[in-house]
Image (tube, grey):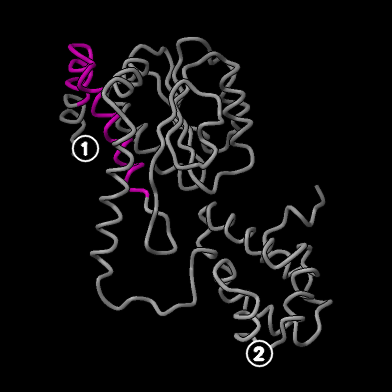
Amino acid sequence: MSSVSRLSLVARIREALPDLHASERRLADVVLNFPGDLASYTATELAQLANVSNATVSRFVRKLGYGSFEEARQAVRAEQQTGAPLFRFGSGNAPTDGIVAAHLEQSRLNLERTYSIFDDGALDAIAMAILAAPRVRVIGFRAGQSFARYLGWQLSQICREISVLPRDGETLAESLPGLGRGDCVIVIALRRAPAALTGVVEALSETNADVALIGDLPRLDALPARWRVSCATSAPGPLLNHISVMAMCNLIAARVIDLSGPAGRQRMRAIEDAHTRLGEL
């Protein structure tokens, strides 16, 4: 695969700008303003928007390294699927009313779709694995880091040996060695994940630790793990709706506490006693 073929549409345009003719530059400006629209326009519609000819559109996409306009459209659709906000933002007029209702309805649908493919058996299996593990690790990158920190914080009320990774100032390579059979690792796997995510999950599987993946990656089922919790994150706007991810983190943490029994209650009492002594709350 060439280096050009790995570039996004926007990166290809930026790279090609010095070699574009005036009409092609005009077309480039239109596309750069709203690159996601390329997925829904025909070549003729795009030519009309930029006031250029269809032939200019054809030359433009070939200079970007695409074989055809349709290939460029498919590439943009793939970018939209990764969750890139720029490619999900259209040039159409933004709605002026019903916005809250639209987001509320999408949140409801996301929760419904997520819960419909998750059951009590899987929930209890994950919770029991966390409770039995000598070490629990929660991993999250980019947006996933905030959910990893939330889940790790809630589980720390019950789990004595828990860390959220990657830790500040450390690489994952410094944190993963030592994990083994019986340990439990929860990975928050969200779009747009760093390229290293696949390698991290594969490395975790080689440790024989129990791995749970929570997220919305299209390739989630292809990653090695004992459990995969697929979360619906569709949204009416440019930002993905992560309400189902937070709900899953909350559900798992709550179930761990429910199943922790006397040992869990004892630890939580000790934490409350410490709060009283230290006057922190």
Per the rendered image, the range of residues in magenta is 242-271
**What residue appears at the point 63 percent right and 64 percent down from the top-left corner?**
73
N-term mark: 1 or 2: 2
Rendered location of residue 253, percent (x, y): 28, 29
Circle number at residue 51: 2
**What residue appears at the point 54 percent right and 51 percent down from the top-left corner?**
82
Amino acid on which disc 2 is placed: Asn
Drawn side of residue 206 relative to residue 165, left or right? right
> How far, Cα to Cα, is label 1 from label 2?
65 Å
- Say which of 22 and 182 sits in front: 22
Rendered location of residue 277, percent (x, y): 17, 28
User: How many numbered circles are shown?
Assistant: 2
Circle number at residue 280: 1
Rendered location of residue 43, percent (x, y): 65, 75
Rendered location of residue 58, percent (x, y): 76, 74
Tell me the SS state at disc 1: loop
